Image (cartoon, helix red, strand yellow):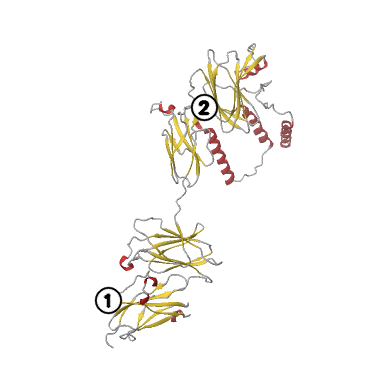
Amino acid sequence: MMAAMALSWYLCLAVTLLCGPSWPQGHSALAPENEVPLRPTAWLPDGKVTSIHLPKGRTRRLYFTLKKKVVMMSVTVSPCDLPIEWTLAARTLKDKPPKSPHWSTKKSMPEVWWRGPGTEAKIHTYTGNAMDTYTGPSYAPASIYILRLRPKDQDTRATMYLHQGSGPSGAFPELPSDPHVHTLGVGMTSVTLSWGPSTSLTRLPHTQRIYDYCVLVNRKHNYRNLCAAREGIRKEQEKDKKRQKKDKQRKVTVWPILKNWWWQQWDAETDLRSPAALRDQHDDLQCVCKGTESVCTVSELVPDTQYYFDVFLIDRLNGTSAAYTGTFAQTHEEAQPAITPLREGELRWVTFRDGGSTSGEFFSFRPRGWQQSGLLTLQSCGSSEKIKVTISSKGQELSSQAVGEDLAQIWLQGSPSYLIHLEREGTAPPRQAALGALKASVKMQASSAYHRQGVPSLPTTLQIKSFNRLRSCDSITLAWMGTEERSLYCVYRRRLGKGEKGGTAPCLGPESRSDTERVVCKYFQELNPRRAVTTAVIGGLEPGVAYMFDVYLMRRWGIPIKYSSKTVRTRKEC
């Protein structure tokens, strides 16, 4: 019962506050008001940096008086990230109000002065989002000075500083005559910046370090001051939190709502931040460069991206800062390797020279037909050298393997185009003696495979057999294993000189042989792999002469396959 009555009382109080007479609001313009709300008055202290919150649609007022015999003064106002309008006025009373015991503190005296007869003179007005300073003589007949601030669009903050007397206040760091940030060098992932040193920092002894440079980088825009940069960072962090975590609905009572509303109204009028709080806020800045050096190299950037760079000189003693004129730079794009397109059925020789590029060679291939399937065959020509081939499509790696002297077949299917990357793995030099004039390290061919479901079959062995009983003075008989697919087999012969050893490099195909060396070509097919043996009788030979025979499997897809060379000597006497 008591809980229900308390809840009813809170609801009635909420309705009364929301539906009853509204709390006195600030006027829509910066004209003098007729009455000051009975709230604690905000005084602008002398020689202290003060930060204040400016709620949207409301005018904030700060009051100050000058000491006796002060002939010059300066008021500095620095908006945070949004434009504001501020004016400085002097209020003069005809008669100074008598001291009353009812006003126990000096905070309420402006309200008493305001009710008395007097005049007001506007001294200075500014609208914008840049730091602005009024410097001029004191208004002799003034009883009190009024600083009015009003945001133009949204809630924001502003920092103020009152200096009594002539000369610089020393509260804000001084910038050099050229306050621009310059770009010394731009790379793919780094940018080097430089700027003129501040006189505030150079005239201090090395033992005193109250100033620090802070370099900030972002991808959106340059910031006019450090407060705007902090607000931008804070908003980005809030967006990231909202993306990562969904808001949960929480049940709240009426009293917390009223309590929060009450304190928000009170804090909007009384939020003045001390210099100590301003000094602490610089500690959590994520500066890419921090210190007293006027050169900074920003690294770990993304290639081909535009970045904005801002340099701030922070006074850690006063909690103030000064902003250089920022700059922006576009990092260089990542070096794109040259990609050579492979034509249909083209036999390509690729050379890897010592001391050459370590990135290897790049090729592209587009299979014909709607099936988008193809066959890539490769063979290395080095004795102990291996080539690594990587196949990718649309940035995704499909396969990767090492290629040696044995023929490698890679099946391509499912993509309209393929990127082929060849890079050297071994360090052994290629066999120049065996290759002759050719200096290629690997040979490669890509072909579209129409109506195929996989790679073609290979012979179970690449050895050639000769029959001694069938060897005569002018002919020999050779046999080798075939496949179940109908293919063309060509036999080449070469007469060996006295003391010459036979042998042909495995990667050299029939295109490197003379037509006079070809002795026979025949088609063969056997569906049973165990019985896929074919023979050929080679005649027209000389008695007692050694011959080297090579057999090449000529396929419709892929590079020809070379069998192991076979050396046979004819009979000297028959």
Identified at 49% across, 30% down, the residue is 322
Q: Which mark is residue 497?
A: 1
Q: Find residue 92 and report its image quarter.
A: top right
Of badges 1 and 2, nearer the viewer stands 1
Q: Give the mark nearest the N terminus, 1 or 2.
A: 2
Look at mark 2 in the image and give the residue it sits on.
Answer: 275
Outermost residue, bottom side: 574
Given residues 23 and 219, the one toward you in this image is 219
Around disc 2, counting alpha carbons within 10 Å, would you say few (fewer than 14), some (14 to 19), or many (20 or more)? Answer: some
User: How many numbered marks have been drawn onto this rendered protein structure?
Assistant: 2
Q: Is residue 238 visible?
A: yes
Given residues 439 and 123, the one toward you in this image is 439
Residue 451's place in the image compared with 301, above or below, is: below
The secondary structure type at the circle numbered 1 is loop
Residue 360 place in picture, x, y as percent: 41, 58
Residue 147 place in picture, x, y as percent: 60, 22
